[in-house]
């Protein structure tokens, strides 16, 4: 069942890839760039670090990380959609970051990397689309180095009484309409708003981080709770005396 679900979601993202960046700007009213910038300011990344950007899509966050690095530091952009990665590669070429960026296709729930490989793992607007989120978090914990950090930027749900109904109306009615008007993809954006509305709340996601084994878990909310950045650290290895 999970494999069929993943295949269907992969097909959806393959389909929307050509319009993905434009629709992100329209749907978020451009604020997704601000959310990512704010999140990046809270990441302490050494210039020679090795980072992994999961569900990297068209590569915006991958490139933002790469711009903070110097060789031999590098970032791997990882996604299951070949069309998304093709668009990401164009951006990498334009930014001339070939020495710091590697793009790879694969399944975020079965990472092809060794234990304790990365100084940072990021995942932006992708965790909600994975059928087994607990498995993905376990894999991320495995490939992080002890003491290294996971940073997850995701859409979330406002809980203020005056804001919540406006947000719900926007995502249930306006977002699919935008998909129809600007991308001729009503069904696809109907699905995406459903994943946004039914994804874990910011507090539930923090609990998921802790249950997966992450420590120092905290989060920051944006736009009255329309998005949230979650942070978690892999425990340090403790040696017996």
Image: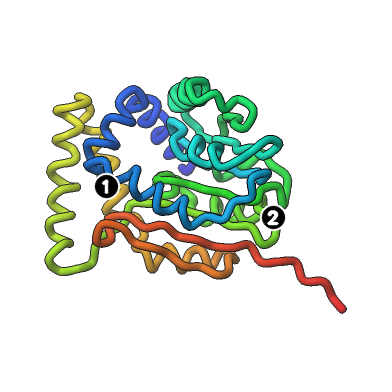
| SS category of the residue bearing label 2 | strand
Q: How is the image coloured?
A: rainbow
N-term mark: 1 or 2: 2
134 horizontally vs 155: left or right: right
| SS category of the residue bearing label 1 | helix
Quarter of the image for residue 105 reads top right
Residue drawn at (26%, 53%) of the image: 197
Q: Residue 37's x, y, as percent?
A: 40, 48
Residue drawn at (65%, 51%) of the image: 119
**Residue sitting nearer the eye, 72 or 119:** 72
Looking at the image, the residue that sits furthest to the right is 241
Q: Which residue is mark 2?
A: 145
Q: Residue 56's x, y, as percent?
A: 48, 37
Badge 1, how many Cα within 10 Å: few under 14, some, many 20+? Answer: few
Q: Which residue is mark 1?
A: 194
**Residue sitting nearer the eye, 201 or 19:** 19
Would you place residue 92 above or below residue 64 in this image? above
């Amino acid at each position: 069942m999970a494999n069929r679900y993943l295949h269907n979601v992969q097909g959806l993202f393959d389909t929307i890839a050509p319009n993905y960046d434009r629709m992100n700007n329209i749907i978020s009213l451009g604020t997704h760039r601000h959310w990512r910038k704010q999140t990046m300011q809270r990441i302490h990344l050494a210039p020679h670090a090795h980072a992994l950007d999961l569900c990297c899509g068209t590569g915006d966050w991958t490139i933002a990380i790469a711009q903070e690095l110097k060789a031999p530091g590098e970032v791997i952009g990882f996604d299951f959609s070949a069309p998304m990665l093709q668009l990401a590669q164009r951006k990498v070429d334009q930014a001339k970051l070939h020495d710091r960026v590697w793009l790879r296709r694969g399944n975020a729930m079965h990472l092809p990397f060794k234990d304790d490989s990365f100084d940072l793992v990021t995942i932006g607007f992708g965790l909600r689309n994975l059928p087994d989120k607990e498995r993905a978090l376990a894999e991320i914990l495995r490939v992080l180095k002890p003491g290294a950090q996971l940073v997850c930027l995701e859409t979330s749900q406002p809980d203020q009484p005056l804001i919540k109904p406006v947000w719900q109306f926007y995502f249930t009615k306006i977002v699919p309409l935008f998909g129809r008007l600007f991308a001729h993809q009503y069904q696809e954006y109907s699905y995406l708003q459903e994943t946004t509305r039914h994804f874990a709340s910011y507090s539930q996601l923090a609990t998921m981080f802790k249950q997966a084994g992450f420590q120092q878990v905290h989060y920051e909310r944006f736009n009255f709770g329309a998005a949230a950045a979650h942070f978690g650290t892999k425990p340090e290895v403790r040696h017996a005396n």
